[in-house]
Structures are given as C-alpha cells and as structure tokens.
Image (spheres, rainbow, N blue to C red):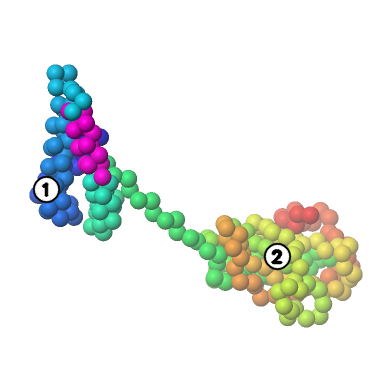
Amino acid sequence: MVAWMGSMAKALANEAEPLPVPLERRVQFIAMHEAFAEAYRVANEPATRTVGTVARKNDCRRAIERESRALSRTLRGAESMSDAQLAALGLNVPKKAARHIGPPAEGPMVKVLRVENASVFIQLCDAERSGTRARPDNAVRAILFYATGRDAARPPEQWQYLMQTNATTLCLPFGGQFPAGTRVHLCARWLSRRNEPSPASMPVSAVLGDGITLEGQTARLKPWAA
C-alpha cells in the first residue's frame, strides 16, 4: 500500500505528464502521503513505537485510503485516461461491456433443390449472399417450420416446428407422414448464439410424391434428426 501510494504521489507531482486532477487535490494527496509515510516509519521503529504513534499511523492510513478511492474514481472516469495509463498507475481497468450481436436482419433464403418421392432436398442461403452456402456470421443455426395445404400465406401460429439444424443443405424425408400429392410449405429463421430468431424467410412449397422415403441416395445431404 505504501509503495502504491508513493507511486501515485510521484505521478501526481510529475509536471511533464500531468494527470487530469486539479492542482489542489494533487498537492493535498502528496501531503497526505508524506504524512502517512512518516507516521508509518515512526510506528514501525522499535524505539518510537507507542500506542500514540500507532494510532497516528492508523488515522493517516484511513484518511489517505479514503482519498485514494476518490482519486481512483476520478481517474477512471476521466475521458483523457487510457487503459494503459490506468494500468500503469496500478488501477483496475474498467471492463468493456460485451457488444451484443443480434440475429441477422433478414431471414434465410430457402431453396428447394429437388423432390424425389417423399423426400424434399433444400438449401438455406444467406439472403445477402445467395451464391454461398455459408450462414451469416451472426447466425449459428437455423430453425425450420412447415405447413400443409394449398396456400402458404398463413399466420405464424399455424406453422409447425420441424427442426433446428446447423447444416445448410438438407434432405427432409416426409415419407409415411403425408399421402402423395400433399403440398408442403417450408420456411426458416436464423438463430443467433443467444437463440434470438431472425425474421422468417419467404415460404417455399413442394409437392410430395408416393410417400416412399429414399434409402441410400442421401449420403451427401444431411437428413433431419428425428
């Protein structure tokens, strides 16, 4: 503590690189440090250590501790003080607030690659970079929904959850769930690291075939997880 206060007093007395502290406070702190350093020395010398000198040392310590805390708050709150300067003075550097990275501003583009019998092959694309299969930087996975019927225009509550996936090219095997000729509508949202959803994609549609799920022909595409 004595050493740190001595370093602070020396920094406050440095006129070549003055700290953003009023002159009156600088002079006051330097005087308080000198008083505390002397009281500390006297109280720790066997020849001069008495109840009175120890009490004097403790009074000086409490006074300069209060001023040190106030001075630290002043320096940490000064816009002109850099993190490096604060660290050099032995002060804790304020932690920067973590920047919140939200979900993408646009939903994914869903492309139906093909339909083979009851399996629908789709690709999810970044709407701003439709030529790539990579997800947007602020999306860690996608969530898929489906609906059936003639019309894809329906309120959100009528879409049913299908799956979450970190793949962008998938095989969706609907075999056995719906009869041939069923029109299946699909839409998706990106999810951020905090599970915050992006806006929904434009829905796409596919008409299922004879209801037989493909076997052995989908290795290069990731089927959904049951």
Do we see residue 118 in this rendering?
yes
* Residues drawn in magenta: 53-66
Residue 188 quadrant: bottom right
Q: Is residue 148 above or below residue 221?
A: below
For the point 61% across and 71% down, the residue is 199
Mark 1, Cα crowd under 10 Å, few <14 / some 14-19 / many 20+, is: some
Asked whether residue 55 is drawn in magenta, I would say: yes
Q: CA distance from mark 1 to mark 2?
A: 67 Å
Identify the residue at horizontal 16%, vertical 31% (top origin).
Answer: 39
In the image: residue 169, left or right of residue 140: right
Q: State the image coordinates of residue 55 (x, y, percent, origin top left).
A: 21, 31
Determine the secondary structure under disc 1. helix
State the residue at coordinates (38%, 51%): 95
Q: Which residue is mark 2?
A: 144
| Residue 133: % across, % down | 60, 62
Badge 1 is on which residue? 27
Of the pair 215 and 66, the residue shown nearer to us: 66
